[in-house]
Amino acid sequence: MSVEEGLCLAEKTGVRLVDEMLFGAGALSSIPLNDIDGAARFLGKMAGVLKEKNFFGAIFYHHIASLVALNRGDTLSAVEHARTSWKMSDECGGPFIQNIMHYGFTYTLLEAGKYRGVARRIEEVRSLSRRTKSALMEYACLLLESLLAMKTGDEKTFLNRLGKAMKLGSARGIRFYTLLLHSSSSMLCDRALKEGFEPEYVKTLIRANNLAAPDPEAEGWPWRLKVHALGGFEMYRDDTKIEFSGKAQKKPLDLLKAVIAMGGRDVREEKLTDALWPDAEGDAAHRAFATTLHRLRALLGIDGAIQLREGMVSLDGRRCRVDVREFERALEKVDERVKKLGYSDSTENLLEKALGLYRGSFLPSESEKGWTAPMREKLRGKLLRHIRSAGISLEEAGEFSKAVVWFQTGIEMDPLAEELYRHLMVSFTRLGQRSDAMAAYEQLKKNLFSKIGLQPSLKTRSVYKSIFPAS
């Protein structure tokens, strides 16, 4: 029975004996969802009904309060609440409760940066877990040891304990839930994936706990949501394609597309409403936006994927993988390499990777919508500039075969790019492929005339004449 159902039943019957535990369960279950404000609200309600003589309720309350404080970065309060729950559990004498609260206090000290004595405390938790034969607590101890080793720079112990934890967790089907902060869980999962420790189990952990990637570029991370906007529009939730049907989904999807088109981060509400509801003003525009954002969140089905803060909308790059942003990061790496090494082999490799991410123009089926044009031209233009520069650099280095490939790639993207045709003609000529140079010129003439009714420029005709003076 859910917490809400239990509270409704208590309201109807007037039986309020377990309200404090229901509120506590609501607070505890909100933490894995990263709804810390919700957890705090439930905790406040629990405090309001907590009975003075309910020893176990008080232990439970302080344990949850420590988790809420820890998630909010208030390590001082977290440690005090965790210490209280630990001492109270020792007084009550219940081995399972003692185990959990000893673990909670030890973990809180660790996250608070108080490493002294933590290793000894972990062994005390492990000793208690042996009395209850708890695989969960042995798993928790291994996680604590791996975190301690990571934070103190003991790489060997870190990998040893992390590998053992993932192996035990996989064998027993254990999930993190409230064992660790989301940030610590993400770091451990990311490293476990990189090391190949039970990868399928680790991916299950990530999805079960709705973990955000520690880095937007985390390799191998099982992104909860993937959005493709290059060459077409597709979305995947947990690697399953989301199918769209009916007009009801059109406006929420337009909102998502507009957010991506406008950079994906810190997009002002007013900019979005101007694009999507140009005829609406003031409160009407805001209501349309708020309703559509709510529907979009429901459609995505991933908590935290799309965020609204201070009137600005962002896609969380640690929960959502958007091919546009991935492509932009790839081009940024090309820029950095060019500044250091020019168009070397390693730069070419990076450019080829970026080109592989470019499945086509940005939202090609939405070209009639003016707000898609700036992003489309920006991405296409930047890629073409790199392709042009790579080709010219190779041409100047005498590597004409490689140069030809880049010039042809650029022409495929822009069939009217006269400069690329001129360089292509020259490179073909240097390779002794005069017939290919002539074919390139004829193709340019055909494209220019059929698409815009023009002839090649004087500069292009001059290059042609220099190659074929008798023509």
Image (cartoon, rainbow, N blue to C red):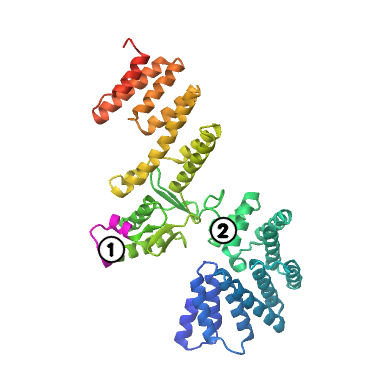
Residue 176 x/y as whole percent: 61, 64
Residue 317 x/y as whole percent: 48, 54
Residue 412 x/y as whole percent: 38, 31
Where 433 sits versus 130, above or below? Answer: above
Q: Identify the residue shown where x is 58% and y is 58%.
A: 186
Which disc number belongs to residue 453? none
Residue type, label 1: Ala
Q: Which quadrant of the rendered structure holds the C terminus?
A: top left
**Magenta-highlighted residues:** 270-283
Find disc 1 in the rendering and name its residue.
285
Task: Reply yes or no: does residue 320 show up in magenta.
Answer: no
Q: Nearer the viewer, residue 418 or 446?
A: 418
Q: Mark 2, mark 1: which one is toward the viewer?
A: 1
Q: Nearer the viewer, residue 347 or 459?
A: 459
Q: Determine the CA span between mark 2 and mark 1.
A: 37 Å
Find disc 2 in the rendering and name its residue.
206
Q: Quadrant of residue 93?
A: bottom right
Q: Quadrant of residue 90?
A: bottom right
Q: Is residue 11 visible?
A: yes
Task: Reply yes or no: does residue 273 show up in magenta.
Answer: yes
